[in-house]
Amino acid sequence: MLVRKKFPIVLLFAFCAGINLPAGAEEIPRAEESGTNAMNTAKDWGIYTQLTYVNQWHNSFRAPYAADNSMDAASRNNQTADITLMIGRRIGRQGEIWLNPEIDQGFGLSNTLGMAGFPSGEAYKIGQNRPYPRLPRAFFRQTVNLNGENEQVEAAVNQLSSSRMANNLIFTAGHFSVTDIFDNNTYAHDPRSDFLNWSIIDAGSFDYAADAWGFTNGMAIEWNQGSWTWRGGLFQMSEVPNAKVTGLHLQHRSMVSEIEKRYVLNGHPGKFKLLAFVNRAMMGSYQDAVALGQQTSAAPDTALVRKMDTNKGIALNFEQELFADAGIFLRGSSNSGHTEAYEFTDMSRSISGGVLVQGNRWGRSDDKMGIGFAHNMLSSDAKAYFAAGGMGILIGDGKMNYGAESILEWFYSFQLNKNWKLSLDYQHAVNPAYNKDRGPITFYGLRLHAEM
């Protein structure tokens, strides 16, 4: 097996540790997120950087058979690393433009295959041995004031400081991630600082438009009115499932709408969100693929039966602060399940949730610990397809003895100093890739993250 070395980008970590830049994170902050200890280098400019290294290992596990998309049953270890520079400039009074050039390196376990709820949100579907450059975000944002009291928006990553009215419209357009704006959750959404598993940090059945790294071209609008927010977006899907987004077109497109209600319960804030999406692209029907496979005495393949089709879905997202230093979260999602998964992962139904606690309860106020779970399922059409030997985006063992994929994750994040965090991560997966004949699998992870 090829040894995938990571030392070139790790040297960049050591070099950048001495750079005196403001603190940062990776996602576009939403309208309600204004608190940060970061500061802009100048009134009309923002410059931030982040570095993340993840090392994951899993035990050997029972696997009587395997195929191209199976996770390697032998004990394996892989690493991923990235370094990002976030640069922003004010345009006019309430407009801003941001660029996020990045250098990536590494591979997910088994080339990011073998589980629908993959264990690392820092692992992409494409990897390389050597560091390679990307531009995951290049977008413009414009705020339009409507009415209400003035509120101060503090400087943060991908957000300049400003003053705006409480009721407003926010327009975003360019290249970014759908989940920068939709399906956010305070306690589980950031693989660089909280949970790592794909189906815990995002709604697992939300097949959002994305290239193999999780980004796309699109536009979104947010209408903030009192304790309510409505969001809508139109995004470009790749021309072939699980591929790169190329050019500018809406022939293959995703439309997303989300309504959010904010409230206070016994003095503690909470949020409830309802999201709906409609994807329109060249998709293969699971039923058509199985029927063709039976006619030709071959394994079913959705690539052979693709036609313009639609996949619809919904996602519920709930979070509630219990105490000033602890909160819970819960997500549930579902899609039609009759067509192949297109961009995210092979999942028709999912429920996930958990709790996150800050470390001041045991004398370490900047540490945090989380425990989460995910229970992922397939539709009847998808079960028949994979049982007959079909391959998906992430899964496909050649055959399948179906069982829901269940995942438990625990992490602890140590604040080493002002800039650096070290996290330990543990995950246990039962029925990986919905297959009772394989697993269970235990994953151990180490994450090093810096914000400067």
Image (spheres, helix red, strand yellow):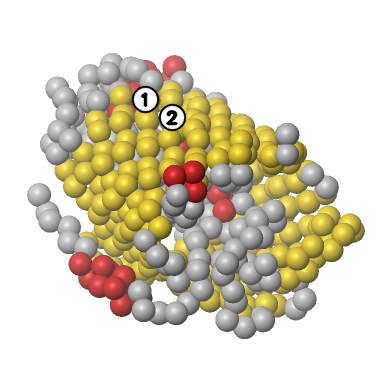
Give the structural element (helix, strand or loop) at label 2.
Answer: strand
Tell me if I can see residue 105 in this picture. yes
Q: In the image as oriented, which residue stretches furthest toward the right?
A: 147
User: Residue 109: percent from the left, percent from the top?
Assistant: 25, 45
**In this picture, is 297 found above or below 374?**
above
User: Residue 262: percent from the left, percent from the top?
Assistant: 73, 41
Q: Do the residues labelled 2 and 1 touch (CB within 8 Å)?
A: yes
Question: Residue at 56% of width from left, 44% of height from top?
Answer: 325
Q: Which amino acid does label 2 sit on?
A: Ala
**Which of the 4 image quadrants contains residue 15?**
bottom left
How many marks can you see?
Answer: 2
Q: In the image as oriented, which residue stretches furthest toward the front?
A: 363
103 and 264: which is toward the camera: 264
Is residue 387 left or right of 191 when viewed as pictured? left
Q: What residue type is labelled 1?
A: Glu
Give the structural element (helix, strand or loop) at label 1.
Answer: strand
User: Residue 152: percent from the left, percent from the top?
Assistant: 75, 65
**Residue position marked by numbered label 2 in the rendering:** 374
Tell me if I can see residue 250 in this picture. no
Question: Residue at 26% of width from left, 38% of height from top?
Answer: 443
Q: In the image as oriented, which residue stretches furthest toward the bottom?
A: 42
**Residue position marked by numbered label 1 in the rendering:** 405
Q: Earlier in the sequence, mark 2 or mark 1?
A: 2
Quadrant location of the C terminus? bottom left
Q: Distance between the residues labelled 2 and 1?
A: 8 Å
User: Residue 385: percent from the left, percent from the top?
Assistant: 36, 23
Question: Residue at 26% of width from left, 58% of height from top?
Answer: 106
Question: Residue at 22% of width from left, 19% of height from top?
Answer: 437
